[in-house]
Each structure stands twice: as C-alpha cells, then as structure tokens.
Image (spheres, grey):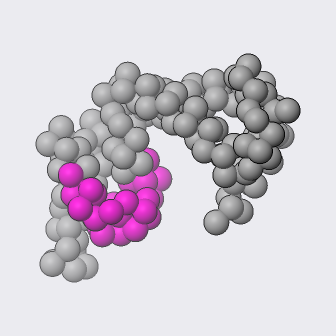
Amino acid sequence: MLIINAVPYPPALASRVGFLLAQAHMSARKRADEALAGVGLDMKGFAALATLASSGPTSQRKLSELIRMDPATMVDVIDSLEAKKHLERRRNPDDRREYALHLTARGRALFDRAEKAILEAEKQSLGDLQPAQVRTLMGLLEKIQ
C-alpha cells in the first residue's frame, strides 16, 4: 500500500497515475499559492510575469497561448498587473494594431521575490528528493500529454 503524507491510499487509488498526479499537484499548488500570496501575487499573475521575464515583451494573445490561459482570463490578469504598474502595454513598432506587454522594474522586482518564494515552496513539496531525482521527475512530467 502506498503511503503519502502518512495517509494510506487504497490500492485501487494508489495504483492510478492520474490520482497520484492530482494529489501531488494539489499539495504543490497549495504551497505555491501560499508562497505567492505572501508576496501579493497569484499563480496566474506569476505565470504572466515569469513568461515576460524569460521571453521578453510579447503580445497579450501570444502570452495567453504560451501559458495556455483563456484569453478572457488573461485580460483580467493583465489589467490587474498593469494597474499595479508591474507591466505596461506599448504599441508594437512592427504592427501598430497590436500592443506588446513589457515588464516594468517594479514587475521585475515582484517576479524576483515571487520566484524566491515559489522555489522555497517547491523545495518543501519535493521533500527529500535528490537533485538527480528531481531532474528525472521533471523530464518525465514533460513527457506527459
């Protein structure tokens, strides 16, 4: 019988990949949400800032595609981040009909704090896994479709 967090799962559940992935997700997500709330951000906002920090300025449509977020939800996320001056919309010089989203210095500082907080939450979620095990886990998760 598989035991996670000192609670044994029935064999019919402990042998189901989807169930175990869901349990791991809920545990990791709870920690991440708590860590991000501590810096005044949520996961959707973090995803937007992280993408802009790593990919540079991009259109709202492209950002929505990159993080697989519903465009209507993306509007709310971007509006909130813009209102707090974490990002700004600028006309795309290559296509004047489109805006590019740019991370501001304030947004970069928030992202840096959020990234530190989420890294600590991930350490807690991963427990005693060794670095090689974490790399293996990440590689396997990337293969799941």
Depicted 42 relative to depicted 138: above or below: above
63 in the magenta segment: yes
Is residue 58 shown in magenta?
yes
Which span of residues is magenta-colored?
A: 50-76
Q: Residue shown at 21%/57% (left/top)?
A: 75
Residue plotted at (41% across, 48% down): 47
The answer, for residue 113, to whether it is visible in the render is no
Place of residue 12 in the rendered image (x, y in percent of width and height, measured from the top left): 77, 44
Q: How many labels does the image show?
A: 0
Residues 115 and 70: in front is: 70
Q: Which of 119 and 86 is in front in this view?
A: 119
> Is 135 drawn above or below residue 145 in the view shown?
above
Residue 41 picture location, percent across and down? 33, 34
Q: Picture quarter containing residue 73? A: bottom left
Residue 79 image point, x, y percent: 17, 50
Q: Which of 1 and 17 is in front in this view?
A: 1
Residue at horizontal 74%, vertical 33%?
A: 9
Report the side of 29 relative to 129 (left or right): left
